[in-house]
Amino acid sequence: MSGIATNRVGVRELRIGLLGCGMVGQAVVRALEASSGRLAEAGVGGKCVVALVRDPDRPRATSGVALTSDLETWHQHGVDVVVEALGGVEPARTLIARVLSSGIPVVTANKSLVAAHGLELQRLAAQRGTALYFEASVLAGVPCVNTLARRPLASGRGHWAGIVNGTSHFVSSQMAHGRGFEDALTEAVARGYAEPASDADISGRDAAEKLTILLHLAGHGDVTVDDFPRRGIGDLEPWHFALAGRLAGVLKPVVMADTAAGGGAWVGPAFVGQSHPFAQITGVTNILSVGRGEATVTFSGPGAGPDVTALTVLDDVVEAASGRAPCSLPSPEASVPVARHLRTPKAGAWFLAIDRVTSSAGELAEFLSGNHLPALALACEDQRFGVLTAPARHSTLRAAVEAIAASGVRATWWPVLEVPRG
């Protein structure tokens, strides 16, 4: 950072290099120009001088930014800070490793990369006397990553719950009002909340990557994305939401993790009762609850869209310019292994959506009770039932659902999100 020029009194002028210049990269360029006054108040000025792209001839809203597909040409621009906006794991990992090895700090919002290789890249950065910043990798516009990393008592209490993917939340919020899945997803893409290829959002992988990063921040470096039981929102149907509503709830795409013995994890839709704080938010809003009881810390704000992401990225650029240390992921020696506790959902209540039922409500309740899964509440509509069950282990639930399927009836299940208690 010693080569940063100072053209205005107290303002450090940064030469920023982009890796990638798609939706997020172009949003960073726009945000940098639009926020120059506020950045100057923080003691930082700067300009995106070069972007490494696959196709320099493709039209982009980046006047004044040199576009090149040649890595050596890109390096010749002598940047002070690099913003990675490629997405995905490769070639982002290889390029970032090269940048960090040269002593240049890197800012990224790439949750796939940080979840898979954040630990090793931070170690590399420390060895080279620089840093990797990734505040925007979890909740886009909500500054929670650095806060949790710097508050071990908040981030290390073993319980996380949240809605952490704005795209899937927008789609499910639309479906709760009767829209079909494809129609809602098309609108999410049109509004810029989702990429045309949005499988990571719909499948729940994006949310699982964010939960992985959060657990890494809490010192659990053994956790990987594939440790969490996960289901996407692609099999949700409007009638699921209608029956959930009749049982005083809504279906939300959530992440849950409890690292205590007997805990568990879940990434995917869950039944959220109307009394739960998560039930009150809609659209692309994200929310994250960390901790237990009175020690719970909650974050909430916008969670999707390139413009929101770009502002958080620029906040990290300011952090990099100041030399302030970023959040720190655990070393292998300090990591507390918990992955084995997270590979099945936690015991609790369940919501069942059962289709093509020919028996009565009483007969269904008797059948569930006989399979050790008592029904606490039922709602019926056109041979379809919504059922809230008593708390049970996941193995008990699966056995009961298999018994239902054996009778020729289609049943889908989701966990019930517990109401937080003080």
Image (spheres, grey):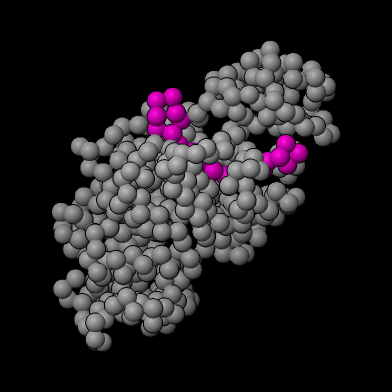
Question: As rendered, which of 321 and 300 lies closer to the eye?
Answer: 300
Name the quadrant of the N terminus: bottom left
Q: Which residues are magenta?
A: 245-264
Please state if 400 lies on the left or on the right of 324 as rendered.
right
Question: As rendered, which of 109 and 10 lies closer to the eye?
Answer: 10
Please state if 300 lies on the left or on the right of 94 as rendered.
right
The image quarter containing residue 382 is top right
The image quarter containing residue 212 is top left
Magenta-drawn stretch contains 100: no
Residue plotted at (29% across, 77% down): 43
Residue plotted at (71% across, 40% down): 248
Please tell me whether residue 263 is drawn above or below residue 216 in the rendered image.
above
Residue plotted at (43% across, 48% down): 297
The reply to whether residue 407 is in sight is no
Magenta-drawn stretch contains 259: yes
Question: As rendered, which of 108 and 251 lies closer to the eye?
Answer: 251
Q: Residue 143's x, y, as percent? A: 41, 59
Q: How many marks?
A: 0
